[in-house]
């Protein structure tokens, strides 16, 4: 389970996916499978959460990593490169962005 702190000891990645109601649940299933079978087993992985909006047109993914290099290394694995090609076909766009927590209230 993600724990959000502003102590600067982890890398936060927020990824947003633009999709369609017809593909939203397939996308969520593909992401759940990727986390279960691959991502959660990568070095430096801490936690993640998946979210879908009410209109089923956007999916958001919050993930935490020990270091930004751990997240980048996961993306470069052969398995995730193949999975991301499939995921890309289920959405119009997706963009992972690295953030540093600035405050927790």
Image (cartoon, rainbow, N blue to C red):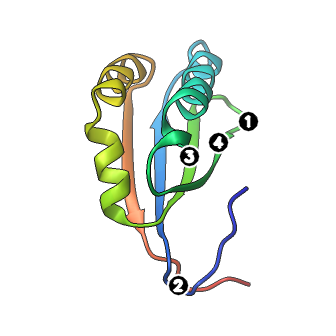
How far apart in space, not on screen, are marks 2 and 3 (Cα)?
19 Å
Nearer to us of marks 1 and 4 is 4
Secondary structure at numbered mark 1: loop
Is there a contact, CB below 8 Å, between mark 2 and mark 3? no
> According to the image, label 4 marks what residue?
50
Q: Which mark identifies residue 102? A: 2
Mark before the other along the chain sequence, 3 or 4: 4
Residue 92's quadrant in the figure? top left
Question: Dot 3: few (<14), some (14–19), or many (≥20) neighbours within 10 Å?
Answer: some
Circle 3/circle 4 CB separation < 8 Å: yes
Q: State the mark number for residue 54.
A: 1
The location of residue 72, given as percent across then percent down, is 30, 51
Quarter holding the C terminus is bottom right
- Which of the image's four quarters has the N terminus? bottom right
State the residue in front, 53 or 40. 40
**Disc 4 packing (10 Å; few <14; some 14–19; many ≥20):** some
Q: Residues within 10 Å of mark 1 (few under 14, many from 20)?
A: few
Residue 61 circle label: 3
Quote the CA–CA distance across marks 1 and 3: 15 Å
As drawn, is 9 to the left or to the right of 67?
right
Q: Report the residue at 62% width, 29% height from top.
A: 32
Work out how far the residue at label 1 is from the one at label 4, CA to CA, in angstroms: 13 Å
Rounded to the nearest whole Å, what is the CA distance between mark 2 and mark 4? Answer: 21 Å
């Amino acid at each position: 389970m993600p724990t959000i702190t502003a102590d600067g000891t982890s890398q936060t990645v927020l990824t947003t996916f633009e999709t369609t109601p017809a593909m939203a649940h397939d996308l969520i299933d593909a992401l759940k499978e990727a986390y279960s079978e691959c991502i959660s087993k990568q070095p430096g992985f801490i936690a993640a959460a998946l979210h879908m909006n009410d209109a089923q047109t956007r999916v958001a993914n919050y993930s935490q990593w020990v270091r930004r290099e751990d997240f980048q290394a996961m993306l470069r694995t052969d398995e995730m490169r193949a999975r991301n090609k499939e995921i890309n076909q289920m959405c119009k766009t997706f963009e992972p962005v690295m953030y540093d927590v600035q405050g927790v209230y």
